[in-house]
Image: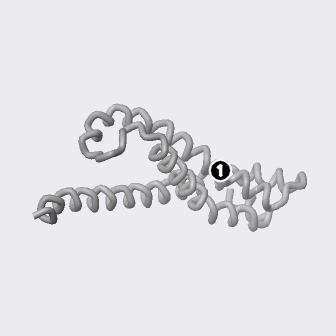
């Protein structure tokens, strides 16, 4: 009897978890694409920085910082729709308030971690590229 009464709730939790995972995957793909394009646009700047003595770690930090700024803008932009939808979501939460600080911090940290992972490959590529290659591609 209890199993049958909880089956609807379990289905909803699995469905919401699946959509959350899909949203995080799409976030990573979007940030990766934006970082790749932005790094290509800034290739001349990176060449100049390398010519002035910047090493690979500084170039990587430059590209990863761009990914973090993109994620920060996405988090800030997502807060308004979240606050607007909060009353609708409250009925789906059991034992957790909609403004639970731990949940909000965990979501923010997971999005930032996703952004840093998504910008890892473009930052390595930019740091390893020879200045002549960067100039040729721009």
SS type, badge 1 = helix
At a point 57% along the width and 56% down the height, the residue shown is 113
Label 1 sits on residue: 41
- Label 1 crowd bin: few (<14), some (14–19), many (20+), radius 10 Å: few
Return the residue found at the far left: 1
Tell which of 121 and 112 is nearer to you: 112
x%, y% of residue 65?
A: 67, 49
**Left or right, 71 with reference to 57:** left
Q: Please identify the quarter of the rendering in which residue 88 is found.
A: top left
Horizontal side of 35 relative to 10 (left or right) equals right
Q: Work out whether residue 110 or residue 99 is closer to the camera in this orientation and state it.
A: 99
Question: 57 or 18: nearer the eye?
Answer: 18
Quarter of the rendering containing residue 87? top left
Q: Residue at x 29, y 39 (%)?
A: 90
For residue 18, side relative to residue 39 (left or right): left
- Give me the residue at 41% from left, 32% from top: 80
Q: Position of residue 127 (x, y in %)?
A: 75, 63
Q: Which quadrant holds the C terminus? A: bottom right
Image quadrant containing the N terminus: bottom left
State left or right for residue 134 relative to residue 70. right
Question: Coloured how?
Answer: one colour
Percent position of residue 106, x then y = 50, 50
Q: Position of residue 67 (x, y in %)?
A: 60, 51
Q: Residue at x 69, y 50 (%)?
A: 42
């Amino acid at each position: 009897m209890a199993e049958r009464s909880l089956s609807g709730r379990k289905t909803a939790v699995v469905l919401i978890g699946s959509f959350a995972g899909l949203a995080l995957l799409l976030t990573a793909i979007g940030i990766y694409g934006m970082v790749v394009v932005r790094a290509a646009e800034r290739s001349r700047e990176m060449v100049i920085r390398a010519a002035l003595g910047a090493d690979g770690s500084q170039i990587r930090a430059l590209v990863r910082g761009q990914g973090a700024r993109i994620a920060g803008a996405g988090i800030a932009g997502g807060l308004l729709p979240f606050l607007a939808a909060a009353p609708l979501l409250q009925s789906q939460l059991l034992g957790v308030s909609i403004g639970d600080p731990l949940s909000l911090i965990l979501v923010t940290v997971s999005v930032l971690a996703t952004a840093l992972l998504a910008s890892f490959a473009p930052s390595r590529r930019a740091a390893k590229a020879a200045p002549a290659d960067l100039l040729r591609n721009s």
